[in-house]
Image (spheres, rainbow, N blue to C red):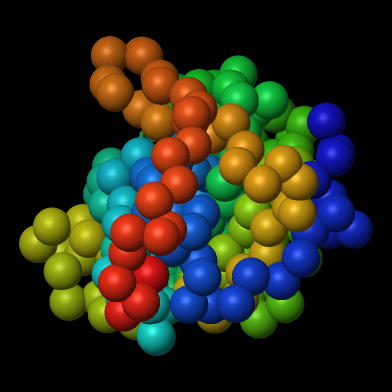
Amino acid sequence: MHKYERANQAEVPLDRARRYLEPGPVVLVSSEHEGERNLMTMGWHMILSFTPSLFGCLISAGNHSFELVRKSRECVINVPTTALTDEVVGIGNSSGREIDKFTHFNLTPEPSDKITTPGVRECYANFECRLLDDSMIERHNFFLFEIVAGRAATTPEYPETLHYTGDGVFMVAGEIIDRHQQFLPQML
Ligand SMILES: Cc1cc2nc3c(=O)[nH]c(=O)nc-3n(C[C@H](O)[C@H](O)[C@H](O)COP(=O)(O)O)c2cc1C
């Protein structure tokens, strides 16, 4: 279970965070505020820019994570693989108001480099985020972050990530189609 711990990870250049997040994997958002920590499952997110490396996402105001992230102005975006499917489902169907999800789901808080909030050691990749723009939180529950540090496991090159279709059903990342040769250099 601990195969993605830091020893097996390499730093991800910030402008390469898209490599892991643009395919839209389900992620686990870790948060911490004044000593209280939490985890939530997230499918609604997007990369918005390479440099600076911007990440936007939707955290519903009803979620316990909403206030923790809004107040601390930071979070870690953790990318799980299918090895954590039960945890992804459990974390997305329970509230941090009632349980400590790190303890309950037997996940390890991994200290971050640039922010206070810990990541999840058992995840394939971890991206440390600082809130850049809070102007759409009130109206749309939309958080715009700058990714300030990132690391990812070096193998496998393309992990089996989960992609949510709604209704309790996930797709799994699979076949790779490489069309690098057909791309304009500025489009790579
Ligand atoms: C696959 C999946 C994807 C989800 N995506 C989101 C999302 O993008 N935004 C959101 O606010 N909640 C999303 N949720 C719901 C939260 O994970 C869920 O409400 C969770 O219980 C919140 O935990 P918290 O109250 O401890 O913060 C998702 C749940 C699942 C299972």
Q: Is residue 187 left or right of residue 4?
A: left
Q: Position of residue 187 (x, y in %)?
A: 30, 71
Residue 82 seen anywhere in this rendered image of the structure: yes
The residue most toward the front is 181
> Against 89, is 160 above or below?
below
Q: Is residue 58 left or right of residue 162?
A: left
Q: Position of residue 83 (x, y in %)?
A: 68, 25
Q: Residue at x 68, y 58 (%)?
A: 152
Residue 59 seen anywhere in this rendered image of the structure: no
Q: Quadrant of the N terminus?
A: top right
Q: Is residue 132 left or right of residue 11?
A: left
> Against 133, is 173 above or below?
above
The residue most toward the right is 7
Could you say which quadrant of the image residue 55 lies in? bottom left
Could you say which quadrant of the image residue 105 lies in? top right
Q: Position of residue 156 (x, y in %)?
A: 72, 41
> Against 119, is 72 above or below?
below
Q: Depth check: 177 or 7 in front? A: 177
Q: Is residue 165 left or right of residue 140?
A: right
Could you say which quadrant of the image residue 21 lies in? bottom left
Q: Depth check: 45 or 141 in front? A: 45
State which image quarter holds ligand 1. top left
Q: Position of residue 161 (x, y in %)?
A: 53, 34
Q: Depth check: 41 or 165 in front? A: 165
Q: Residue at x 32, y 64 (%)?
A: 183
Q: Residue at x 60, y 42 (%)?
A: 158
Q: Quadrant of the C terminus?
A: bottom left
The residue most toward the left is 139
Q: How many marks?
A: 0
Q: Depth check: 160 or 181 in front? A: 181
Q: Residue at x 53, y 77 (%)?
A: 14
